[in-house]
Amino acid sequence: MYGEVILALNTIFNYIVLSFSSKIGALQVSRKRLLLSALIGACVVVFIGQSVIPMIFAFVVMTISAFGFHFMKWLKSAVICIVASLFAGGLLTAFEPLFFKMPTVYFASTSSIIAVAGLVLLQNRWTVSKQQSLERGLVFDTTMTFQGQSWQLRGFIDTGNSCIEPLTGRAVHFIAWSALEDRMVDVLKTALQSWQSSNPYKLSMFPKELQSKLTVIRFSTVQEKAVYGIAFRFDQWEVHGEDGFYIAPGFFVLTRESDHFPQQVDVILNVSTLCQ
């Protein structure tokens, strides 16, 4: 009976770690294969022994069985498994006093819940960190020139922003109102504050020399609500860095809805910027 309990507990723990590694590594392994691999690893430990060499052998056999024989793919999965095992093992050690004299069934279920909860939290933190790292690679310092004025703006290339001005097909970028408000000329600021989205094509409040550089566009918000906005054609927009470049001619829209701009940037750049 003791052997069956050890086998079951090892299988459960192995499956939790393998499942975590599959998700983190985006390896897309079926649950049946993960469960079978977890059982194989547990059998090796139980029937051969729990010393260092059998445990290393069990780990190698288990991970190869789960993730395949390709060395780089296996190495990636093995590293994640080691991290997950150390984290879950340390977590269970910290909660060990709770398991004292606990019946076997409750011990197995409680330890499994703690291990799963800990690895889920680790997975979420890992995912957030990875996303933030990817986002940082899409953040650039830029200089936008419009009507003889230049603004230093921090921009984020958003793969979800594919908005274009329908008549010209040129890209539309979104700038936070707060980024330009204090440096905007009074004539433009007054005109924008006077413009009404309920009557979007009334543009008489804008100076005549500026009207040739603006257009009204209709686009959908994240909540799929159709809204109108004033799009201005910028004079020049430079992206700084080692591989600096100039953004293709296009438009920008000033938006007050900038609370959810990632990485505290001033600008959401069009996805087409990636191709320039």
Image: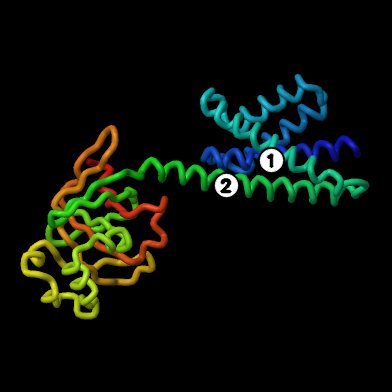
Q: Can you give x and y, in whole percent of width and height, for residue 12 in the image?
A: 74, 42
Camera-side residue of 81 and 49: 81
Q: Height in image: 7 above or below 145?
A: above
Camera-side residue of 207 and 25: 207
Is the Cβ of the residue at disc 2 closer than 8 Å to that at disc 1?
A: no
The local secondary structure at tag 1 comes to helix
Quadrant of the snapshot with the N terminus: top right
In the image, what residue type sits under mark 2? Arg
Q: To which residue does mark 1 refer?
A: 15
As drawn, the residue found furthest toward the bottom would be: 198
The local secondary structure at tag 2 comes to helix
For the point 74% across and 38% down, the residue is 89
Q: To which residue does mark 2 refer?
A: 125
As drawn, the residue found furthest toward the top would be: 53
* Label 1 environment density (alpha carbons within 10 Å; few <14, some 14–19, many ≥20): many
Quadrant of the snapshot with the C terminus: top left
